[in-house]
Amino acid sequence: MRPPSAPSLHSPLRFGVIVMVLGSAMFSLRVTPPAEASSRRPVPRAVATVLVIAVENLIWQDITPTRYPAVWKWLTTATIGSMSLHSARRSAPTEREMFATFGAGTRSYAAHHENSCRASAHVVACRDAPAIIAANRDALFGSVPFALGDALDRAGVQRSVVCAERLHHDVCDAALAIANSRGDISIGSFSARPAPNAVAPHRSVTVIAVATLSKFESMLVTTNGSLPADATIVLSPHTAGSTPSLTAFAIVAPGYLAPTIVYSPTTGRDGIVQMIDIAPTILGWLHIPVPSSMEGRPLSATASRGELFAEMADLRATNRDAQLRDRMIGGGVATLATLEILVVAVFVIALLGSHSAKAPKWLRSERTAIAIEVACLAAIAYVPATFIINALPMRDSSHLVFWPTLGAMTVVVSISTWFGSGRDTRRTMGSLCGATFVVIALDGCTGTHLSYNSLFGYSATAGGRFAGFGNTTFAFFVTAAVVLAGLLTKRSRLGAVALLLGAMLLDGAPMLGDDVGGALTMALVVVVFYAIVYGRRLWSAKVVAFSGVIGAALAIFALVDANRSRSAQTHLGRFVNSVRGQGDSEFWRVIHRKWNASMYLAGHSVATFTLPIVLVLFGFVWSRIPRTTRAEIGDDRSVRATAMGVVLIAIVGSLINDSGIVVAFGAFAIAVPAAIVALSSRLRTKVAGP
């Protein structure tokens, strides 16, 4: 066996080109890119009467032309999508909280109270309105409950609510959607059959709560499919069962041509909306200013892409993809944690065996060392494999199909890089980090389709993020970039720094990664990496000037995004404008929210138990390495820069991102196997001699 040669970037780049070509082919076969801004039709906002129909447990899988012909016929005139249900609570929201979120235009709290919304004569009163307002005062999302009802009141728009069949013992929580801050609605009823004249003839907003899809079908039959309003929204605020699901959503209004897919600037995904988008949309139709407290954005429609069957099939597929991800995420994290612990533990055993004359020969052989390195390579390959598998049609798979397929994908990625790198473990390590970097970078440049509903990306039902780079994806991406930069330093220090700058810009760019916390973390990583590889002090003039250039680039990104139209702004621009409008309180509210989310994950994540074990084992490995070898490693600027970059990603990234310790877990999932490969190869080279 020839000794390993110096790490080379040729193999990672060569493999990266191959991955780009294969990735492009998979995208063209598997996914449809989101509609460009130019293809979205402007929606006229000239309506006087708005009707909102809330149907319990309405999902696209239940709607067929044979079972519900009137609903199906009405949908052929509609712009359709799916709704991701989220309130301010991390757990599954109640129907009551979703109506409160509707009325606030921002994720809200609404615990159950005995004094709910009830009818009295011709007035619907929500007696617990003060309690809801108090619960959301200074809360994490800055919610202002009943903002929609107050805005409609000020504009003189009539409001009414109809709760069919006396839902829940005369309680009509749907009234929370349009009640004002006093908790009342001037017109309301609990009629058993919503009549066509339920909508006022002049400027008005009416909410009708329907118990079942069959009742909605009956309503359409009664009205001959012509609902009495200029604009109609059909949504579902609740789903039955314990499995999170996307619910059906539809709009019939002037300008929303059919069949089309709805677009939400809040989610940035064609066909996926949130409850917080409804209030701004209604206010826009009625030409009423949208309160600054509303987090949602007005909805528009994309250009038509096909028939209703095809559009509905895409929405059903998205829901199944999200549910598959939700079923598999626990096993995915457990597998990654197990791999992370095993590769370090096995290396510890082999290291102890190599220093003991009583250990079996096979434990001290070079083949065993190479086998351990190959296992580490497989642990790294598992990461890009979890993204690549998302290009395959796996949505209806069971555990017995998904996990063997993912295992096979990991083996394929490992073997292809192994032979592509001349069967050299250190080069293969660089190639696998290159594959991880290129796959995620390519995904970011093409709409993050591989991250969407993937194991370590984000799902539509989880709803924390719908576009850009999630926190775990960020950790994988930038850690792979740091390892690659460390390898590249041997050939070009400038090229290594440029690689990290490119990773930072891709991660933070509003229309690509849109990752505020990640970009800030990477800015610090780039500065420290630059200082170490060039032998500069952090407070030297050149490092300070370099830091200023990076800070200016981030500021330009933020200002450009913040000054775009409200509907076009991404996460970064909305954050800047929120701080600009509400001052320091909004900034600290965001910090508080991220801290709370981090603390929650720290108590519920496998990473909390995995990382201490990994770090202790790796610390033991470092203590068993000869002092001369440790000194050589410590004198290597590229190694020190890489190690410091990973540590900063783990610590700073965990502190300023709401995923907390999960960021450190993702960073070490790449860095620890790569470090073991590098150490093992170095030790084998020393034993073999020149």
Image: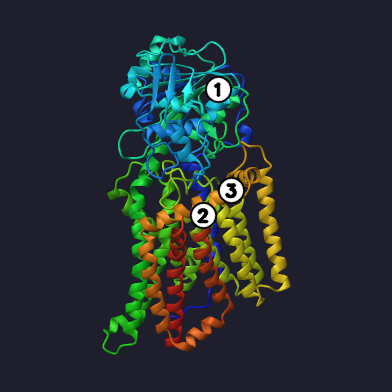
Q: Quadrant of residue 490?
A: bottom right
Q: Which residue is mark 2?
A: 440
Quarter of image, res 407: bottom left
Residue type at mark 1: give it. Answer: Leu
Q: In the rendered structure, are the residues bearing label 1 and label 3 in contact, judged by CB atoms less than 8 Å apart?
A: no
- Residue linked to disc 1: 257
Q: Whole-percent x and y of residue 168?
A: 32, 25
Label total for image = 3
Marks 1 and 3 sit apart, C-alpha to C-alpha, by: 42 Å
N-term-proximal mark, 2 vs 3: 2
319 or 125, which lies in front?
125
Is residue 22 in view from this perspective?
A: no
Q: Earlier in the sequence, mark 1 or mark 3?
A: 1
Query: Can you identify the residue that label 3 sits on?
Result: 585
- SS of the residue at dot 2? helix
Separation of marks 1 and 2 at Cα, in angstroms: 35 Å
Question: Marks 2 and 1: in contact by CB < 8 Å?
Answer: no
Q: Nearer the viewer, mark 2 or mark 3?
A: 3
Q: Secondary structure at mark 1?
A: loop
Q: Of helix, strand and loop, which one carries label 3?
A: helix
> Does 86 sit left or right of 331 as displayed?
right
Residue 462 disc label: none
Q: Disc 1 or 2, which lies upstream in sequence?
A: 1
Q: x, y (%) of residue 627?
A: 46, 88
Label 2 Cα neighbours within 10 Å, binned few <14 / some 14-19 / many ≥20: many
Foreground label between 1 and 3: 3
For badge 2, the amino acid type reads Ile
Say left or right for 587 vs 1: right
Nearest the viewer among 298 and 106 is: 106
Q: Is residue 85 visible?
A: yes
